[in-house]
Image (cartoon, rainbow, N blue to C red):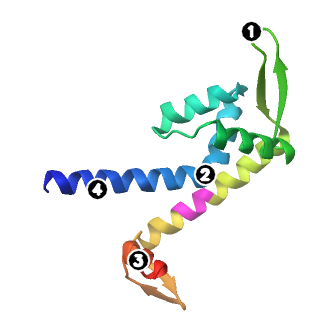
Amino acid sequence: MSEGETKRMVQKMREVQVKLMRGLLDLVILQFLRVHPMHGYQIITHIRKNFGVYFGPSTVYPLLGLLEEKGYIKSTWDLNNDRPRKVYCLTHEGENLLGFTEASLNQICRKLMTMGLNKIIVNNGVSALPLTTLKTAETH
């Protein structure tokens, strides 16, 4: 494999990782909060350290607000530092959602592994089209 091909492959893998993270960001945040309460900047930092992907305040804070509005997390103000920080923790509803989401994600992963990542079910049959071919077909 040439250096250029390697770079392109790494770039594609990174694109897939960012896309998956964007779709699973709420799950990731809930999982972090399952371990211990955090303020927004801690969440942003943990995402970057654990996944190598940066989601900034304009992405994370609105999602935290939405999760709180839905009752999955709650916040309290920590006034014991130099500056006040809103600290988020997981609620019972959030714990339940996390459990359901993990179960669904595990089921999806098992299904993908049993049928192969390059095959999909189409009209009760299996298509052996590579996913890249399907993506290209979807965009046209």
Q: Residue at x 70, y 40 (%)?
A: 30
Work out how far the residue at label 3 is from the one at label 2, CA to CA, in angstroms.
23 Å
- Looking at the image, is 12 positioned above or below residue 114? above
- Looking at the image, is 59 positioned above or below residue 77? below
Chain-order first, disc 3 or disc 1 = 1
Chain-order first, disc 3 or disc 2 = 2
Q: Secondary structure at mark 3?
A: helix
Q: Position of residue 32 (x, y in %)?
A: 65, 34
The amino acid at mark 3 is: Thr
Task: Tell me the magenta residue range.
Answer: 105-109
Chain-order first, disc 1 or disc 2 = 2
Q: Residues within 10 Å of mark 1 (few under 14, many from 20)?
A: few
Work out how far the residue at label 4 is from the one at label 3, CA to CA, in angstroms.
17 Å
Chain-order first, disc 2 or disc 4 = 4
- Looking at the image, is 9 positioned above or below residue 125? above
Q: Are the residues flagged by discs 2 and 4 in contact, CB closer than 8 Å?
A: no
Question: Marks 3 and 2: which is nearer the front?
Answer: 3
Q: Position of residue 121 (x, y in %)?
A: 50, 83
Which residue is disc 3 drawn over? 136
Q: Position of residue 117 (x, y in %)?
A: 41, 69
Work out how far the residue at label 2 is from the one at label 4, CA to CA, in angstroms.
22 Å
Which residue is disc 2 drawn over? 24
